[in-house]
Image (cartoon, grey):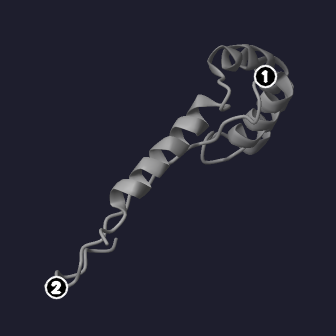
Amino acid sequence: MRTEPPFKHGIPQKTAVLLVNLGTPDNPDAASLRRYLKQFLADPRVVEIPRLVWWLVLNGIILRIRPKKSAAKYQTVWTEHGSPLLSIGREQAEKWRKALRPAT
């Protein structure tokens, strides 16, 4: 594990903000949800069970049932700007960018 470097006077401090979004479907329809869920749930960092078992569960059960149900729920929150998660995330990123912009 890295330790923090020693403090030195006269060096401007740096600030960073990390915004993380685990993804969102392109559209609130079953086909888009199926693509999104397949990509997201196939990541071994998201589901940590043996790959073969998970592949069977994901492709045999989840991707046959969940996309249609999830699409119906996404349709209730979808806006003219698209997915709220994505549009709000973009707004937050822009506000942080402006707030952290160095004074000129």
- The N terminus sits in image quarter: bottom left
Point out the tag, 2 or 1, that comes first from the N-terminus: 2
Query: Is 88 placed left or right of 2 in the picture?
Result: right
Q: Nearer the viewer, residue 19 or 48?
A: 19
| Disc ID at residue 67 | 1
Give the image quarter of residue 77. Answer: top right
Within-10-Å neighbours for mark 1: few <14, some 14–19, many 20+ = many
Q: Amino acid at mark 2?
A: Lys
The residue furthest left is: 9
| Disc ID at residue 52 | none
Query: Is 16 placed left or right of 6 in the picture?
Result: right
Image depth: mark 2 or mark 1 in front: 2
Q: Report which residue position mark 2 lands on.
A: 8
Q: Position of residue 76 (x, y in %)?
A: 65, 13
Q: Nearer the viewer, residue 2 or 78?
A: 78
Query: Is 93 placed left or right of 32 in the picture?
Result: left
Give the image quarter of residue 39. Answer: top right
Q: Are marks 2 and 1 in contact (CB under 8 Å)?
A: no
- The C terminus sits in image quarter: bottom left
Q: Position of residue 10 (x, y in %)?
A: 16, 86
